[in-house]
Image (cartoon, rainbow, N blue to C red):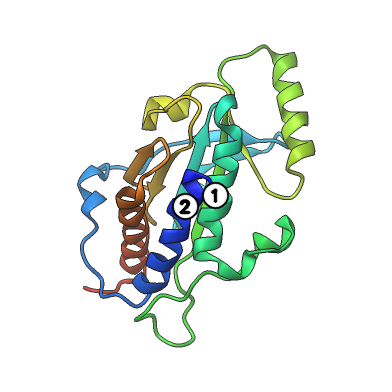
Amino acid sequence: MTRSLTVFACLAVATAASAQAPVVPAAASKVAEPKPVELVLEDQFGRRAELGTLRGHVVVLVFGDRKGTDACKEYGEQLHVLFHPTAKGQTPDKARTAPVVPLAGVPEGKKSPEVVVVPVACAGSVPGLVKDVIRNQIKKASPDVTVWLDFSGAMEEKFGLRAGQPNLAVIDAAGRLRMKVNGTPDQATGEKLVQTIQNLRAEAAGLGK
């Protein structure tokens, strides 16, 4: 079992427990930006990809350079399954529509705030023909799951980037940065990540006020 899978195996237990845990202030809230993060990229189909369209959801951007592609894929898939357990073993198309884990305290009949995991490929500044090649490669490798493409270095500028490893940025329902992790998290960081996401879901649902 790889290091990241070992971490996520532990996090699976933490996620199930935190779904029923009392809401506590997210430690990562200290890094929240006063204004929503402005991020406009594109996806592998050439469509506009804008972070602002995901307001109302807790968004986890999982990103890395070319050498970190496999780690990011593994990281993103495991993180999605943590909050959408019925996605496990499903085809990518079905996995992305799996229901999110219910949040304790949300009134019956009201949907729990969603956790949207967005993979972002940081390709850097490359010529137009190379961009087309990258788009086609990703389109072929991921026809069902949307992948955002960063050709401008925006992800590294806004969130930092550790080469060859997965990186992530957690965005709250109002579009603000609340936590970032550069590199594969250890267990303590992973547990903090899960709790932060759960707290932000509770915040989005208006719980604990």
The residue located at (53%, 69%) in the rendering is 100
Q: Name which residue lies at 35% across and 45% down.
A: 186
- Expressed as whole percent of the image width and height from the top left, the position of residue 53 reads 52, 50
Vertical position of residue 193 compared to residue 46: above or below: below
Q: Which residue is nearer to you in this view: 128 or 181?
A: 181
> Residue 1: which numbered mark, if any?
1
Q: Give the amino acid type for the residue marked by disc 1 in the picture.
A: Met
Mark 1 Cα shell of 10 Å, populated few (<14), some (14-19), many (≥20): few
Q: Residue sitting at 72 percent across and 34 percent down?
A: 138
**Residue flagged by tag 2: what amino acid is it?**
Thr
Indicate left or right for 88 with 91 as reference: left
> Does 179 appear above or below 91?
above
Tell me the tag on residue 6. 2
Q: Is residue 69 left or right of residue 93?
A: left
Q: Is residue 125 above or below residue 191?
A: above
Q: Nearer the viewer, residue 69 or 180?
A: 69
What is the distance, in whole Å, between disc 2 and disc 1 at their CAs? 6 Å
| Image quadrant in which you'd find residue 87 | bottom right
Tell me where residue 42 appears, x and y as whole percent.
62, 34
Asked whether 188 or 144 is in front, the reply is 188
Q: Quadrant of residue 24?
A: bottom left
- Asked if the residue at tag 1 contacts the one at tag 2, i.e. Cβ–Cβ closer than 8 Å, the answer is yes
